[in-house]
Image (cartoon, grey):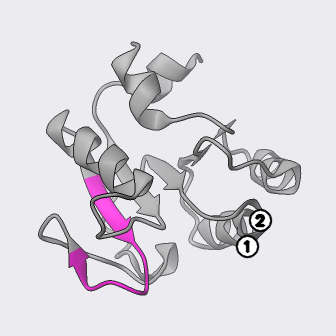
Amino acid sequence: MNISEMITPPKTIAVVGLSDKRERQSYQVAEYLLSEGYTILPINPMIESVFGLKAYDSIADVPDDITIDIVDIFRRSEEVPGIVEQVIQTGRKPLIWMQEGVLSLEAEKIARDAGLEVVMNACLMKQQQGR
C-alpha cells in the first residue's frame, strides 16, 4: 500500500505531542489536517485542549470506542519506541507516522514486529497536499 492510500479517505489521527502554540509545527500540521476533514485527537499531558478538542495524556487514555487510524508522532526520536509500545499495548493497529526529523529504527522494528505499518521522517501535511 502506498502512502496516499494509507491516508485516504480522511481518518482519525492521534497527534502525539500536539502543541497549543500556533508557531509549532505540530499545531500547523494538525490545523491543516482538520481543515481537510481529518479527525484529530490531541495527545499531550501538558495541555487541556487545542482547537476546542480535549487533549489526552497518552494513547492509552483514548477511550477504546474511538478508532485511531494513524498515530502521528511529534516527539524526540528517542521517545518513539515507548510511544509505539504503548500503542501496541492498547491492542490498536494504527499506521505509525513519525514526522520529519523523527527517526527511530528501534521503534520501526517494534511496530513492524507487531504487524503495524510505519512511515518515518515524513510530514503528513505535505503528503496529504501531494496526493
Give the residue at x 39% y 33%: 125
Amino acid marked by disc 1? Gly
- Tag 1 residue: 82
Give the residue at x 37% y 68%: 19
Crowd around label 2: few <14 · some 14–19 · many ≥20 (10 Å): some
Q: Is residue 114 left or right of residue 72?
A: right
Q: Residue 68 in the image: state x and y as whole percent.
A: 41, 55
**Span highlighted in magenta in the image:** 40-49
Q: CA distance from mark 1 to mark 2?
A: 4 Å
Provide the secondary structure element on which disc 2 rests: helix
Dividing the picture into quarters, in which one does residue 57 lie? bottom left
Of residues 2 and 120, which is closer to you in this image? 120
Give the residue at x 79% y 67%: 78
Q: Is residue 50 left or right of residue 15?
A: left
Q: Is residue 114 left or right of residue 1?
A: right
Image: 91 above or below 97? below
Task: Find residue 81 and name its label.
Answer: 2
Q: Is residue 89 magenta?
A: no
Residue furthest toward the front? Answer: 23
Q: Residue 105 in the image: state x and y as whole percent.
A: 87, 48
Q: Residue 18 in the image: state x and y as whole percent.
A: 40, 65
Q: In what quadrant of the picture does the C terminus appear?
A: top left
Q: Residue 67 in the image: state x and y as whole percent.
A: 35, 56
Give the residue at x 82% y 56%: 110
Q: Is residue 41 magenta?
A: yes
Q: Are marks 1 and 2 in contact (CB under 8 Å)?
A: yes
Image: 129 above or below 95? above
